[in-house]
Amino acid sequence: QVQLVESGGGLVQAGESLRLSCAASGSMSSFRMGWYRQAPGKQREMIATITSGGTINYADSMEDRFTISRNNAKNTMYLQMNSLKADDTGIYYCNAFRAMTPRQMYWGQGTQVTVST
């Protein structure tokens, strides 16, 4: 069992930056990690994923302002968000996924990001 705890959310002005962190209770080295978000009234969407080896996949239009990274030694993943817009408002979730048997997936509780104009 892996527990994920997000932090770093908050209220910012449009154009500002935030850095989110996701701390795992155990080793996340065998997991593909990812950041997702859910805006009010919308479905949860992927922002980016990063494998244990560092291969990164961004959703369309996310790479220009968002940067995902991870530190396996610290069991922590990060999301640097720059030039934030009002449309970035939502709850940001951390995800851990392992496809190998036994297949495992975990979600954090989410951290609120609110961007005001």
Image (tube, helix red, strand yellow):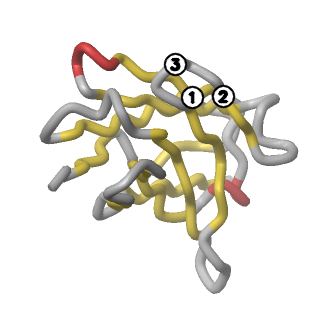
| Residue 87 point in image, percent of width and height | 72, 59
Dot label at residue 56: 2
Measured along the vertical axis of the image, is residue 58 above or below residue 46?
A: above
Looking at the rendered structure, the secondary structure element under dot 2 is strand
Q: Which residue does the image show at 38% across and 59% down from the upper left?
A: 103
| Residue 30 point in image, percent of width and height | 36, 33
Dot label at residue 88: none
Q: Classify 10 Å Cα crowding around label 2: few (below 14), some (14-19), many (20 and above).
A: some
Q: Residue furthest front?
A: 101
Looking at the rendered structure, the secondary structure element under dot 1 is strand
Among the two numbered marks 2 and 1 on one chain, the one whose residue lies closer to the N terminus: 2
Among the two numbered marks 1 and 3 on one chain, the one whose residue lies closer to the N terminus: 3
Q: Amino acid at mark 1?
A: Ile
Q: Classify 10 Å Cα crowding around label 3: few (below 14), some (14-19), many (20 and above).
A: few
Q: Which residue does the image show at 30% across and 28% down from the upper left?
A: 76
Q: Amino acid at mark 3?
A: Gly
Dot label at residue 53: 3
Q: CA distance from mark 1 to mark 3?
A: 13 Å
Q: Which residue is mark 1?
A: 68
| Residue 54 point in image, percent of width and height | 56, 19
Q: Which residue does the image show at 77% across and 32% down from the upper left?
A: 63
